[in-house]
Amino acid sequence: MPPASSGTPAFEEPPDPCEARHLDELIVQLRQLKVWAGNPSYETITKRVNESWRNDGLAAREWTTYKNTVAACFMVGRRRPNDDLLLGIVRVLNPDIGYVTRWRQALRIVRGEAEAASFVQAQASLPDDIAQFTGRAAEIALLTGVVGVESRALPVVISAIEGMAGIGKTGLAVRAGRLLLRQHDVDRVLFVNLRGFHDESRQPPADPAAVLDSFLRLLGVSGHDIPLDVDRRAALYRKRLRDRPTLVVLDNAADAAQVRPLLPDDALCQTLITSRRTLSDLEGVRHLELDVFTPEEALGFLRRTVGAERVDAERDAAGQVTAVLGYLPLALRLAATRLNTRPNWSLGDELRRLLARRSELRLDDPLENSIGLSYDDLAAQPRHILRLLSLHPGDDFESQTAAALVGSDPSTMEQQLTNLLRNNLIVRRKPGRFELHDLVRTYAAVRAHDEERVTDLRDSADRLVSHYMRTTTAAMDLLYPVDQQSRPHVQASDTHAVPLPDEASARSWLDSERANLLAVATDPRNQDPSAVAVAFATLLHRHLLTGAHYSDAQLVNQFAATAAEQSGDQAGQARTLTNLGAIFGLTGQYDEAVRCLEHAVILHETAADLYGQARALNNLGGIYARMGQHDQAARHLQHALDTFREIGSVDGQAHALTNLGSVYEQLGRYGQAADHHRQTLTLCRESGDAEGQAHALTNLGVAIAQVGQHEEAAAYHSQALELFRGLGDRYGQAHALTNIGFVHERLGRHEQAATSHQQGLALFREIGDPEGQTKSLNGLGKAHMAAGNHTDALAAFSEAGQQARATGDLHGQAHASFGLGDAYHKTADHDRAGECWREALALYERIGATEAEEVRTRLDADSRRDAPGA
């Protein structure tokens, strides 16, 4: 054992990482390992890790040079620490190869748990109310009265409904929420199932960061504008909730840590939390410990559901039935359903059945008792269906999906689901979508493994994957037909296809099934997890990026890349690393993007996949262009273009030519830029790619406008705008409008320029494109400057600079600083003008832009003005 430092307790053996159940527990183990190793400082650990990596031959830019980066690995609550760095720390604290391997295995296990925790979908409405809701008068009065009476003085109203499984917590929260809406105490709802007590082999408790992502989207925040950091997400969420009465229902919470980031801070908001645990460490919360029904409430429930005359005629038997069921609401509801389906069955018959069957159940638990009795009452086919439904890894499903699982037709499945719904073994949260209660799912899963053949379970799971993959392919073919050739081949299936008659239905299906598609894609129970994950990651990639679901795209591709690496699928790993590079580029994580894409290029070369290699090079060139490294960008893009030409990929050539043209524009080589855009236009016309033609036209207009061909540029932009409108492409329309604004400004049409930029900006804001907003704002600032509206110009350039800094857009930031300098100069604020021009000059020089010379001219003139005697 290494010696412990003075005053530090020592451990005889290093901690076992495989004992960690989740990421935070693994970080606690890392802290203990640090103590075991003598508690070296973070600076010492950093030096040792750098030395170790240098000895391994890693490039200098891949070393971790900051002790703060190392220290962050020891912090709990972080969702995604750097795996390589964490394992590097373990190795310098205990270099035993076997021990490091155990850490690598443990990290993969808890990382899989963290990824699954990130799949969640909130809703902006409450689930259906329970028609036979009974009792709970005091609890309802407490939950609905606090808003109007005593809590207006409190900063925020939070009520935690706590109690055992099946006690009726969710039903009470839903009833109270509906009354609050009816009383107009709140006028908006956010509801989410936090899966705190869920089958963790399927999905663990929901990650608060993922819940905040879903809440923010429901509150109107574009995916592009959602921060990656959970604290910043929570701050934006609370800001969005202010000044509007909102009910937030956090159902099935695991613990206080899961709930805390999701709590509003506005007095107009009411929060209802349900949990099986007492959340005593949540401050400022009204705790409502929910008990089973009283005997009177239980009898009242039976009188309402079974019938007053029927219960009153056998009052003693009814009382004994409620007692045997432990007065548990869910158990009573299932018993009432059973009695209602047997009108000739007396309460005495039900009592004798309960007593006779009680000893046959495996658990002495009234809820398990009720589920088992209800299950046994079903005919063979619905029991079989319920068992197979437990295999679904997502939170909800539609009848088409259930039919695929079972191998049935949708119309028959509708009837069977109605039967299960009537017996309270499934629930319908919203029209057309069904869920299994967590405990019913667990019970059904146990019965599935007891009563179904292994081969039948495997076939059912395969049908589910095939159903989702086939429908996803059909939806993507409708929405993105140009990409058809690059999507994986999907084999024909005997499951019934989901009807997708048009683009709107395809988009709607992908959006409603997104969480389920991710759950299926990353389900480790799949026969070939790597092949399934890679296929779904490839199929969904463009749609996830178009919708700005960057976190989802990152998670599914990281899972697929890891699975492919473990299975030795180099081609699959290369494809998903290429996708990851694009995702990291869009989120401003350029170093990560370069790392992924460089690795992908090597893997594609090894697999002799020229198309994949060219695609990775094209993305890599685009990243270098964003980073202002134009020589690197041009070299990679030219290599990609040459390879696409070699293999005859028309769409690949068009993408590479477009990116190269953009690089040449940034370098001031406008003739070459225009030539590349013309080549792109020709290719897209030959292939019938209308979207590609529109982009090529507006890009060509940008290039020729730089050399004074303004009228011709305006014509190209107008053609592009019409094409984009015909395609319903708002992103393209926004770019075309902004480019038209620049042409108007150069032709001296300042009012028309401002109007075009404002129209483009509105569209960019609507679709959530931060770089597009920066471009429009810079254009608007120039239009205001030309019209003499210097105050408005300052506002536009300032907002453009803020957007550009947030996304790492160096070009946009340089243009904004240049514009601000001009605006401050016009308002006689020469000191601030000089500061902005100097900032612009540094940025232009960094990215090698031709505007640097123009800024130097401004600065030289300004310095002569300040010179003595000037």
Image (spheres, helix red, strand yellow):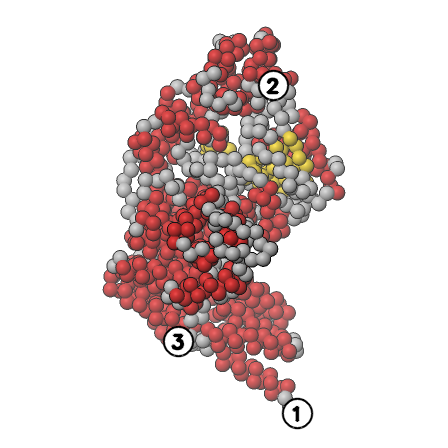
Residue at 32% x, 40% y: name it.
527
Residues under numbered marks 1 and 3 in contact, where contact means CB atoms less than 8 Å apart: no
Q: Which residue is mark 3?
A: 669
Foreground tag (2 vs 1)? 2
> Which quadrant of the figure has residue 63?
bottom left
Q: Does residue 86 appear in this view?
A: no
Asked if residue 567 is positioned above or below residue 616 in the image, the reply reads above
Crowdedness near tag 3: few (<14), some (14–19) or many (≥20) residues, C-alpha within 10 Å: some
* Circle 2 residue: 298
Q: Tell me how far mark 1 sits from mark 3, CA to CA.
A: 41 Å
- From mark 2 to mark 1, how far is it between C-alphas? 97 Å
SS category of the residue bearing label 1 = loop
Give the side of residue 616 with respect to residue 143, left or right: left
Residue under numbered circle 1: 869
Question: Judging from the image, what secondary structure is the residue with disc 3 in?
Answer: loop
Task: Farthest residue to the top: give it.
Answer: 313
Q: Determine which quarter of the picture holds residue 659.
A: bottom left
Query: Whole-Å distance between the Cαs marked 3 and 2?
Result: 81 Å
